[in-house]
Image (tube, grey):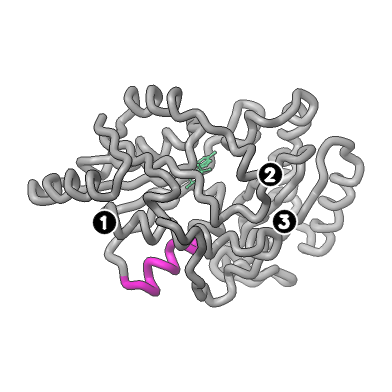
């Protein structure tokens, strides 16, 4: 596995590879890697000659300084993990390398989807995400890039950004990888206390019940039920629960035939914020 820390080095390496007609699959991450990340890498390797993984904790997508400071950093074990995976190139730049002296975001227009859910509760988050992903795309110029459906709103944002900027990159969504007890894998899970870790699978359990209820109950009733369930839970605090149209992310009041819906949830387990989502069957 090749490891690069500068734009110039990785650009020059990938230019040589592209001249040999090699295709490039890109997996952007913030490190503290788990099997969810590895599943994206596996997907990328199935369809591309070279898999590039970036590890970069992007300061402009954090709305909370404490979360940024405490974000898990595990570059040594991550490097070992990647070396034993299908990753061919690790790109691990510094903040200065990516932003120079101006650590700020560009402003994007995502036609409304940026104002829902994560956009509402994490000010500036998606401008930060789109800024850094666009910069990575300009440096790496991949054929395809792989994102997890766990961050479903982020996946839509990236697809919109690619379309609006007419970038020739295929964006692939990959299924959520879960722990055996159903908790969606996340780098933040390592920061959960024992009690919070034991309580956290309640999030996915609730989502699965939502999926069942969606067949027979209206969305308002389901939302109220979820809110009540979390009120009864001493360890988990609900930030939002929303049933939304999978394309527009607008809140659904009345189900319509031929549309796809999803439930989205954000929960605080102590000071750790966890998100999850599930696709709902529209009968
Ligand atoms: P992160 O390092 O958390 O920024 O995540 C990097 C990429 O991995 C994003 O596209 C995430 O959506 C994806 N990802 C994170 N957790 C999971 C998971 N449990 N299953 C699948 N993909 C994931």
User: Looking at the image, can residue 26 be seen?
Assistant: yes
- The answer to whether residue 252 is above or below residue 237 is below
Instruction: Count neighbours of disc 3 (C-alpha within 10 A) and say few if under 14, some if 14 to 19, many if 20 or more.
Output: many
Classified by dominant secondary structure, the portion drawn in magenta counts as helix
Q: Which residue is mark 2?
A: 66
Nearer the N terminus, badge 2 or badge 3? 2
| Coordinates of residue 57 in the picture (x, y in percent) | 50, 44
| Coordinates of residue 98 in the picture (x, y in percent) | 39, 53
Nearer the N terminus, badge 1 or badge 3? 1
| Coordinates of residue 145 in the picture (x, y in percent) | 35, 51
Q: Quadrant of residue 133?
A: bottom left
In this view, the mark in front (1 or 3)? 1
- The residue at 62%/41% (across/down) is 69
In this view, the mark in front (2 or 3)? 2
Q: Which residue is mark 1?
A: 141
Q: Which residue is mark 3?
A: 214
Tell me if the residue at label 1 has its CB under 8 Å from ligand 1.
no
Q: CA distance from mark 1 to mark 3?
A: 41 Å
- The stretch in magenta equals 156-166
């Amino acid at each position: 596995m090749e490891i690069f820390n500068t734009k110039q080095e990785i650009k020059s390496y990938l230019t040589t590879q592209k001249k040999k007609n090699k295709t490039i699959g890109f997996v952007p991450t913030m490190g503290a890697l788990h099997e969810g990340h590895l599943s994206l890498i596996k997907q990328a390797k199935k369809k591309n000659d070279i898999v590039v993984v970036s590890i970069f904790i992007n300061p402009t997508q954090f709305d909370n300084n404490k979360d940024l400071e405490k974000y898990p950093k595990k570059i040594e074990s991550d490097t070992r993990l990647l070396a034993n995976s299908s990753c061919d190139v690790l790109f691990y730049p510094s903040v200065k390398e990516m932003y120079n002296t101006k650590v700020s975001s560009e402003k994007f227009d995502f036609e409304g989807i940026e104002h829902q859910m994560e956009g509402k509760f994490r000010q500036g988050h998606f401008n930060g995400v789109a800024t850094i992903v666009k910069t990575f795309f300009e440096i790496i110029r991949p054929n395809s890039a792989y994102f997890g459906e766990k961050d479903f709103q982020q996946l839509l944002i990236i697809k919109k950004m690619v379309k609006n900027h007419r970038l020739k990159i295929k964006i692939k969504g990959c299924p959520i990888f879960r722990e055996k007890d159903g908790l969606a894998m996340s780098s933040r899970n390592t920061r959960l206390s024992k009690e919070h870790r034991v309580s956290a699978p309640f999030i996915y359990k609730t989502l699965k019940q939502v999926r069942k209820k969606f067949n027979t109950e209206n969305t308002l009733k389901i939302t109220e039920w979820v809110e009540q369930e979390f009120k009864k839970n001493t360890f988990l605090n609900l930030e939002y629960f929303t049933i939304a149209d999978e394309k527009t992310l607008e809140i659904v009041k009345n189900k319509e035939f031929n549309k796809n819906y999803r439930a989205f949830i954000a929960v605080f387990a102590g000071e750790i914020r966890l998100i999850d989502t599930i696709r709902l069957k529209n009968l």
